[in-house]
Image: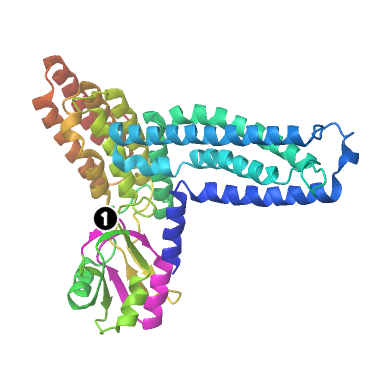
């Protein structure tokens, strides 16, 4: 159930209704509490207190009605601005980046502030009475009106913040930084540090590949019931389930992978047959959904960063400097990866027995994801091609083993060959060729 709870929290974070709903509920409770305080401790004898509302019931109604009307109007404008921003991002930056705007806490809190203030004022308004109402004694909620004024001031401050935040959120440079930051946080979480040794083992799938192949051939296959993307993987629960059954589990694909109906979700080894209930217990530890998410799939963040480059260098946009900004963050991310150990594919229980094998992302796969997709666009643009070659030079200088060097050199050759064919100006080709030669020199002398 833990995986489903994590998935539920992710859905709440990416919704525009959850936080505003909590804020509206809190505002309703605050209104009831303030009404109780007014009834118990604040009456006409307290009117000599300067910071309390000094008017009569008619004035109180007018103030509360004005605040409520303005707040719901501003909430509508805020919602419209947010939708326009999301539409702009989807059409100009990429539809897969919409989740970054949906999860934006600033937009959610701003919308919730206005609606919560509106709900508070409505509830306080119903407690205002005057002598003209038959059978009712005059009652003006002095303290509740003070709180309404404070909420109004908070809403004005929030509106100023929102006006500043909206253009900041659609700034491509800020978006690239956020994606790179989230990516690096996941890499730091998944890849352990390796600062003690200069020479690092080849970044590849750890473990005995032949044994993994045997587990696939001889293991019992647990199949999925629905098609979709693997979104959440509860590693601890899977290890615990495997330990309780004294088996080893091998995932068929990592988080972010797509599975069709009846596809194999995982293999159980030794291959003893499981009951339907046992299969369901294992399958419940893996959430399959309708779209990719970045919670455990950092390659999805890579794809989002690459999508910005592709759209920036498309003929209709031709924004090389946005692509350069993304390449800067790609360099920073890969330097971080190269300074850490490979992600371990194997998970063990408390008794050091192998219980779970997870397909990992190799260094070669990661560099291919970063550089292969935008290659045809980058190679035809001098600014982007030069910057990518400089990235390769920096990576070669930081390379910690022959495997990393070989992988990077493969991309250097691809860029050089593609640029010679696509760069339209002869002088640009010569400049890139000169940079290519100096980049190769990094292999012989990494301190250059």
Q: Which secondary structure, mark 1? A: loop
**Quadrant of the image occupied by residue 261:** bottom left
Query: Could you tell me if residue 446 is visible in this image?
Result: no
Q: What colour scheme was applied to this rendering of the protein?
A: rainbow
| Extent of the magenta region | 231-260
State the residue at coordinates (61%, 37%): 68
Q: Quadrant of the C terminus?
A: top left
In the image, 408 versus 442, the foreground residue is 408
* Residue occupied by mark 1: 204
Residue positioned most to the left: 421
Q: Is residue 318 left or right of residue 16?
A: left
- The residue positioned 29% from the left and 52% from the top of the image is 203
Residue nearest the observer in this picture, 229 or 441: 229
> Is residue 279 placed above or below 286 in the rendered structure?
below
Residue 156 x %, y %: 61, 30
- Left or right position of 419 against 329: left
Identify the residue at image location x=43%, y=68%: 236
Which image quarter holds the N terminus? bottom left
Q: Nearer the viewer, residue 442 or 340?
A: 340
Location of residue 378 with respect to 238 vertically, above or below:
above
Q: Magenta stretch: residue 179 in it? A: no
Residue most toward the front?
134
Q: Quadrant of residue 151?
A: top right
Query: With 271 as the anchor, is 16 left or right in this view?
Result: right
Q: Position of residue 61 (x, y in %)?
A: 70, 36
Residue 402, given in percent of the width and then of the height, sits at: 24, 46
Q: Is residue 180 left or right of residue 207?
A: right
């Amino acid at each position: 159930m833990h995986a489903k709870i994590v998935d539920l929290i992710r859905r709440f974070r990416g919704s525009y209704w959850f936080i505003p709903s909590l804020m509206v509920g809190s505002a309703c409770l605050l209104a009831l509490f303030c009404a109780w305080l007014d009834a118990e401790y604040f009456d006409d004898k307290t009117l000599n207190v300067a910071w309390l509302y000094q008017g009569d019931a008619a004035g109180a109604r007018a103030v509360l009605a004005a605040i409520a009307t303005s707040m719901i109007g501003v909430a509508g404008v805020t919602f419209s601005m947010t939708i326009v921003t999301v539409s702009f991002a989807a059409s100009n930056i990429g539809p897969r980046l919409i989740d970054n705007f949906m999860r934006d806490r600033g937009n959610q809190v701003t919308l919730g502030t206005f609606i919560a203030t509106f709900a508070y004022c409505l509830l306080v308004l119903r407690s205002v009475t005057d002598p003209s109402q038959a059978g009712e004694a005059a009652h003006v909620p002095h303290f509740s009106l003070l709180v309404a004024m404070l909420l109004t001031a908070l809403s004005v401050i929030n509106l100023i913040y929102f006006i500043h935040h909206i253009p900041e959120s659609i700034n491509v440079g800020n978006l690239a930084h956020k994606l790179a930051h989230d990516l690096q946080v996941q890499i730091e979480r998944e890849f352990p540090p390796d600062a003690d040794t200069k020479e690092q083992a080849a970044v590849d799938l750890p473990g005995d590949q032949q044994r993994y192949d045997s587990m696939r051939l001889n293991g019992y296959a647990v199949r999925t019931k629905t098609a979709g993307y693997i979104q959440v993987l509860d590693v601890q629960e899977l290890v615990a389930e495997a330990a309780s059954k004294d088996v080893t589990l091998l995932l068929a694909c990592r988080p972010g992978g797509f599975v069709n109906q009846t596809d194999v979700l995982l293999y159980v080894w030794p291959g003893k047959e499981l009951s339907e209930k046992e299969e369901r217990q294992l399958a419940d530890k893996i959430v399959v959904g309708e779209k990719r998410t970045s919670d455990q799939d950092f390659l999805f963040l890579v794809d989002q960063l690459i999508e910005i480059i592709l759209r920036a260098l498309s003929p209709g946009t031709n924004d090389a400097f946005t692509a350069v900004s993304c390449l800067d963050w790609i360099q920073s991310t890969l330097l971080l990866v190269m300074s850490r150990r490979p992600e371990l594919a194997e998970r063990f229980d408390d008794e050091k027995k192998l219980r779970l094998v997870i397909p990992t992302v190799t260094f070669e796969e990661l560099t291919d994801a970063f550089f292969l997709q935008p290659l045809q666009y980058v190679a035809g643009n001098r600014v982007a091609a030069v910057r990518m070659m400089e990235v390769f030079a920096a990576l070669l200088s930081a390379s910690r083993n022959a495997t990393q060097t070989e992988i990077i050199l493969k991309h250097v050759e691809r860029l050089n060959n593609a640029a010679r064919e696509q760069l339209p100006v002869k002088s640009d080709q010569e400049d890139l060729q000169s940079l290519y030669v100096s980049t190769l020199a990094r292999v012989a002398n990494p301190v250059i």
